[in-house]
Image (spheres, helix red, strand yellow):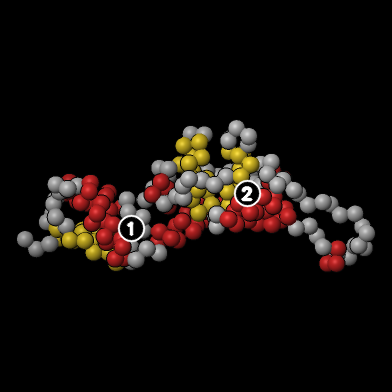
Amino acid sequence: MLVREVMSSPVITVRRTDPVRRAIRTLYDHDITAAPVVDDSGRLVGVVSELDLLRGEFGPDPRASVLPPHAAQEPPPRRVMEVMAREAVTVTETTDVTTVIDLMVGKRIKSLPVVRGEEIVGMISRRDLMAMLARPDGELRAAVEAALREHYPFGPSWDVAVHDGVAELSGPPHEHADHIADLLARTVPGIVRVKHLRRAP
C-alpha cells in the first residue's frame, strides 16, 4: 500500500515565526499531533510536535526548584523556530507504507510530511495507519468489490471475502487477471494481503 492511499491531505502547516501558543491552537483545533513547519516562501524547514510545543510554552516553576524565587530563569522559547525539529524526515506519495512504519520505529517519530518535489502535499501519522487498520471487514469487502467493478469491469467474476484485512478472491484460475485483481484490491486502505482461492469449475 502506498502513502497516497492513507495520508491526510490537504496538509496543515505552521510558520517558523508563529508564536508557540498559536501553533498549539492550530494543532489542537485540527486534532493533529504534529505539523510541518514552513518559511515565508512555503518551503519545508522542519516539523513541530505537541511535545515540542509544550516544552516551548511551559517554563520551570520556581516552586519546584531549589533556586530561590528571585533567581534569574531562562525565558521559555516563544517562536516555533526555537522548539521545532529542524531535520524533517519526509516520504513521497509513492513510498510504501511498510517503509513509513520502519521510519517511525527507527526514528521514534509519529508523523511524516509527504512531499512532491519541494511541495508539501500531505502528512502521514500513526493515527492514519491505525484508522486504516480499524476499518471493518464488511466495509473493506464492499470497497474491494467496487474497485474491481470500476477499474476492471470486463474482467472475470470473483467472489470476495475479507477476514482481518486479508482479501480472499475466489474465481477460476487466470494468471493475468489475478495479477490485476491483486493490484486493485491492494489499493483499498486496510487491505493488508490478498489470497486467491480457486472456485470449482
User: Relative to residue 8, is residue 183 drawn left or right?
Assistant: left
Is label 1 in a helix, a strand or a loop?
Answer: loop
Say which of marks 2 and 1 sits in front: 2
x, y percentage for residue 193?
31, 58
Q: Is residue 68 visible?
A: yes
Q: Which mark is residue 71?
A: none
Q: Is residue 40 left or right of residue 201?
A: right
Q: Mark 1 or mark 2, which is nearer the start of the sequence? A: 2
Q: Is residue 78 above or below residue 41?
A: below
| Residue nearer the viewer, 46 or 195 | 46
Residue 170: x, y in percent?
A: 17, 60
Q: Relative to 54, is 126 on the left or the right?
A: left
Identified at 17% across, 48% down, the residue is 153
Secondary element type, mark 2: strand
Mark drawn on residue 191: 1
What type is the residue that disc 1 sits on? Ile
What kind of residue is marked 2?
Val
Q: CA distance from mark 2 to mark 1?
A: 31 Å
Q: Nearer the viewer, residue 99 or 6?
A: 6
In the rendered image, residue 167, in percent from the top left (x then y), is placed at 27, 60
Question: What is the tally of numbered marks visible in this picture?
Answer: 2
Quarter the C terminus occupies: bottom left
Mark 1 residue crowding within 10 angstroms, few (<14) / some (14–19) / many (20+): many
- Badge 2 is on which residue? 48
Residue 166 screen position, x and y as percent: 30, 62
Q: Is residue 102 visible?
A: no
In the image, is 82 to the left or to the right of 114?
right
Which residue is depicted at the point 48% across and 45% down? 10
